[in-house]
Image (cartoon, helix red, strand yellow):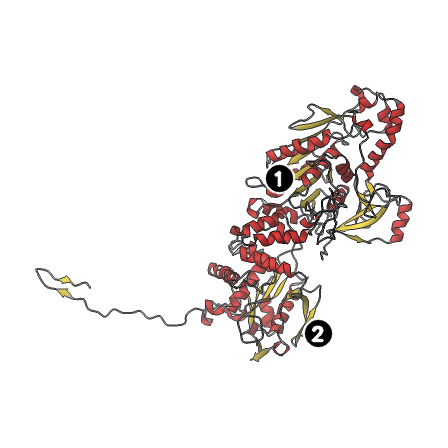
Amino acid sequence: MYEQNLYSIIEPIRKITISRLNKGNKWEYGYNKEHDIVVISKTGKIGEIYNIQGFKIALPLSPGKISKKTDKWTPDEYPKELKGINNIFDWRDYPEEFKNTWGTYIDEHFRRREEGHWFNNKGLDTYITGTHFMYLQWSKIDVGQPDFRESNRLFYIFWEACKADKRCYGMSYLKNRRSGFSFMASGETVNQATISSDARFGILSKSGGDAKKMFTDKVVPISVNYPFFFKPIQDGMDRPKTELAYRVPASKFTRKKLDSNIAAEDIVGLDTTVDWKNTGDNAYDGEKLRLLVHDESGKWERPNNILNNWRVTKTCLRLGSRIIGKCMMGSTSNALDKGGENFKKLYSSSDVNKRNANGQTKSGLYSLFIPMEWNYEGFIDQYGHPVFNKPPEGTLGPHGDVIEVGVIEHWNNEVDGLKGDQDALNEFYRQFPRTEEHAFRDETKNSIFNLAKIYEQIDYNEDLGNSNVLTRGSFQWANGVKDTKVLFTPNPQGRFLISWTPSYNIQNRQTTRNGIRYPGNEHIGAFGCDSYDISGTTDGRGSKGALHGLTKFSMEDAPPSTFFLEYVARPQTAEMFFEDVLMACVFYGMPLLCENNKPRLLYYFKRRGYRGYSMNRPDKLWNKLSVTEKEIGGIPNSSEDIKQAHAAAIEMYIDRHVGLNNEGEYGTMYFNETLNDWSKFDINNRTKFDAAISSGLAIMACNKDLYRPSNKMQRQVVNLRFAKYSHEGTASKIIRK
C-alpha cells in the first residue's frame, strides 16, 4: 500500500493559544515570527496547520456550516440571467429589483475570491484558497472547466503561503508532465491582474514562442471568459497577441460601485498590463513586476541560462529589501546538459529548510515537489483523490469513467516496458517522476561511467523499499572505554549506513606489533576515506567526510566484492569524524586508504597507536615513499596518474558488480547516495564528490596488487653477435639477415 503523503497536520502551537487568539480575530495574514508559521487565513481565525515539505501553513478555521447538498466539488452554474451582461455599464441599465436579486450572488463570489471557499468533499470539510476557487469556478482551459484535484489544492495552499510570506520571492515547482501548471499559472495571472492597479505581470518560457502561446492560448481566453463583475474594461483588442491591458475600473467591484452612475470617463483606470518576453538572461531587466510566471524553467538551453535570468528578474520583484512581487516557477526537467542542471541548482537552493540569517532561502524561492502519482491524468477519482492502488469495483473518475487499476501499477508497467532502453526510461522518469532523483535523471552519454548500470541498480534498490537490507546506526566503545572493543548499535539518527556486519568471532580482530595496532581482517576487505581537517566553515556547510567499506573475495563468511558501509556526514567537529572512522576500522578489523592532502585524520590514527591501520600508497615501494608518507601513510590526490587510477577503479567495479549482470541478477551495491555521486562524477572537478572519492579509494585498497610496482632489476640485453661481410668485388659489404 502507498504510504507517502504530501502534507501532515501538525500542532506547533498550544490549542489554548489558538483558541484565545481566535476569539479576538487576532491572527494576521502573513508570516507569524513568534510561532514560525505562515497564516493564509484572512478571517483573523486559524484552524489546522499544514506542514508541506517543511513549510508550516495555518489554514482558516472551518465555519462549521458547510452545505451538504453535494459530496464533491461542483462549480456554481452561472445564472443565465447574467450571461448577457458584458460589463459594468450594461449592468447599470438593469432595474434596481434585478440588481437586488443578484447582488448577494455577486458579493458571495467576491468573498470566496478573497477568503477562499469551504465545501463538502466525500464527507470532509475541505478548504480551497481564493485563487484555487477562481481557477475551478471561472477559468476556461483546453478541456472546459478544470477538475478538482487534491494535489492542486495543496499546490495552491503552498502558493498562497508563498504570497503571504514577506521573506519569500515565490515558488519553484518541480512537476510531472500535464500537471496543469501552465493553466494554473495563467489563471493566477488573470486573477491578480484584474484586482491590481498600476501593476505589471510578465510571462517567460523556454522560448519566446512558448511564452507567446501561453499568453494567447491560456491567459487571454481565461480573461475573456471572466464574468462581467470580475472583468475590468479592457483596452485594445479583445484577443491581443502581445499585451493585455486593463484600464477600468480601478478596484474590485462592490455593490455600491455596481449601483453607482459614475461615467466611464470619470473612473480611474487600473493601468495594469500582462505581457510576455522572448527568452533571454536579461528579459524584464529593469522592470517592476507584481507577478512573474516562469513556465518550463527546467528547459532553458544554451545560450540561455535560467540561473542568470533569475538573478536579473529577482531584482524586478523587490524595492531594496522589500519584496513587492512574486514568481510562480514550474517545470519538468530536461537532461542535465540541456538546461536541467541549472534548474536543479535553482530548485535545490530553494529548500525552505535551509535559510540564511534573514530567514530566506539561497534563491529566495520555496521549492515544491509533487510526485506524479498524485497528479496523473486518468487516475484521479471523482473526489479529486489519486487512485494509488487497485481500486474497488465501481471507482469513478471525474467524468464518470471507471478506474480499474492503480497509478502505481500503471507506472511500473510503463517502466518495465522501457528497461531495455535506458535513455528512454530516463526520459520517462523526468516526465513522470516519483522522486526528485527521477526528475533529474541524466542521459547515459553524459557520464564517464556506465550510467545505464548505475540507474539499473538505483531502480532495483528503490524497489527494495523498506526492506531490512540497510541499517542505520552508530559505533561506540564498549562501556565508553576507548581502545577496547567497538560495538554497533542501530540508531535512526546514526551517521552510519551498513548492509553487513562480520560474525562475532571476527569483530574487533587486530594484532599488535611493537606497540602499533594492525587490522586482523585485511584479507576480508578495506576502507576508503575522504576526510576533512577543519571543523567549521565560514558558510556553515563545507564538504562532508565520507567513509566506505568494501569486501574482497575471501574464504571468510562475508559477501564478496560488496560495499557494506556508507558514511557521508559532517559532525560538529573534525575529531568526532576521526573517531567515527577509527571505530569503524577497529570494529571490522580492516585497513584504511585515505588521501593525505588533509592529513589530520592520519595523524590522529598515528597518535592513538593505529598507524598499522593506515595503508601506504599502493603504487610505490616502501623505499620510494616520502618521509611524511612513511610516517602516516595515505595517498596523494594531486597526481594525475592517481586520479586516472581512481576513476578506472570505480569504472571497473561498476562494470562488474553494479546493475543487471549476464545471469539476470542485480548487484549488491545498495547505497543510492554513492550511486548518485558516481552518476555525476567529474574527474576534472572532484572536490564536491565526497562519496565517489571515498568509495573509489576503497576499491583501490581492495585491489592494491594491481598498482604495485615491479621490484625486479632491469637488465639490458647486450647484442654479442658479430657482423659478417661479403668481400666479393672491389668493396666489402655487410651481410644482412
Left or right, 98 with reference to 6 = right
Q: Which mark is residue 655?
A: none
**x, y percent for residue 313:** 65, 38
Instruction: Identify whether 53 is placed above or below 217.
Output: below
Pick the front one: 573 or 259:
259
The residue mark sitting in front, 2 or 1, is 1
Q: Residue furthest toward the left?
A: 730
Left or right, 36 with reference to 214 = right
How far, Cα to Cα, is label 2 from label 1?
Answer: 55 Å
Can I make out residue 508 in this image? no
Pick the front one: 227 or 517:
227
Can I make out residue 266 in this image? yes
- Picture quadrant where residue 562 is located: bottom right
Q: Earlier in the sequence, mark 2 or mark 1?
A: 1
User: Residue visible at 84% across and 53% down?
Assistant: 13
**x, y percent for residue 457:** 58, 59
**x, y percent for residue 211:** 63, 34
Which quadrant holds the N terminus?
bottom right
Which three-letter amino acid code belongs to the residue tagged 2?
Gly
